[in-house]
Image (cartoon, grey):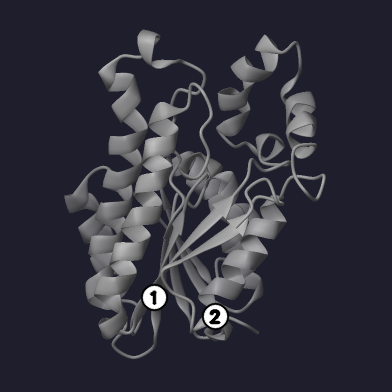
Amino acid sequence: MLLSNKNIVIFGGSGAIGSAVAAACLAEGARVFIGARDAQRLAAAASLLDPGQRMLETFVVDTQRSDVVTRSVARIATEVDEIDVVMDATSVPHDQGTQIDALDLGTFMAPVDGVLASLFNTTKAALPHMGRIRQGLVLTLTTPGGRTAVSGHLGNSVASAGVEAFTRVLAAELGPRNIRAVCLGPHALADAPKAGSYTAKLFAPKAAAMGMTVEEWLGAAAGTTMLGRLPTLKDVAQTAAFLMSDNARAMTAAYVNLTSGMIAD
């Protein structure tokens, strides 16, 4: 199996992407720790992922609080020889559709502050426990907003571009410490809203403005891709598992394009 003997920490592990990645990691033999804000949702996700609780552990955490994140990771570190992978899939609700004339500073900064603070806190907390025995990986998650220019997406686009820049600089800093940094960039996921993702609420106003349901809007978005389809949670999860494996040991400072060709590299 790809991830045997690896210890993987996923923040936002009760969300659609976090849960899907956790499931793929468990299937590939990893020991997985998932953290999230909502204890009930976290427990529900865990019961579906690993009913026997043999290879999965949970922890309640607010990634906006560095002290809480640091304590949570330190507790995990006492149970394993080291942490092999840290991934932050924490969702940060934000505005999509409001142009700058009607946008206030707080709404603009919400995804910028929220996404980057979460990523900084989770990464910094994990690094002291990585790279000593085996090669480590910081796996980040972005959106097409970082590489496209869509009206009404200022906050999302700046936050996403920031994640990519964070990943590149982090890779330069951590390479000598035997730790990689890779950014995974999927398009909107076809099945995420039905899996309980916050994107169902995020996409609803845009879909309604076009007289569509969210499912119809996603279908239209699929038509803008080279492959004629959107990626799925399984696509993201399986790609993430590969990136976490030793088969990807030469990949760092990389942007992994999962936009089905909507963005051409």
**Mark 2 or mark 1, which is nearer the start of the sequence?**
1
| Residue 261, visible in the rendered structure | yes
Mark 1: few/some/many CA within 10 Å (<14, 14-19, 20+):
many
* Residue ID at (29%, 64%): 169
Q: Quadrant of the C terminus?
A: bottom right
Mark 2: few/some/many CA within 10 Å (<14, 14-19, 20+):
few
* Residue ID at (60%, 74%): 242
Q: Secondary structure at mark 1?
A: strand
Q: Secondary structure at mark 2?
A: helix
Tell me residue 262's x, y (percent).
67, 45
Drawn side of residue 141 relative to residue 49, left or right? left
Question: Would you say the residues marked 1 and 2 are in contact, meaning their CB atoms lie under 8 Å apart?
Answer: yes
In the image, 110 versus 91, the foreground residue is: 110
| Residue 92, visible in the rendered structure | no
Tell me residue 129's x, y (percent).
27, 76
Q: Which residue appears farthest toward the left when viewing the image? A: 67
Q: Which residue appears farthest toward the bottom when viewing the image? A: 133
Drawn side of residue 64 relative to residue 144, left or right? left
Residue beneath disc 1:
180
Residue beneath disc 2:
248
* Residue ID at (73%, 33%): 221
Q: Amino acid at mark 2?
A: Ala
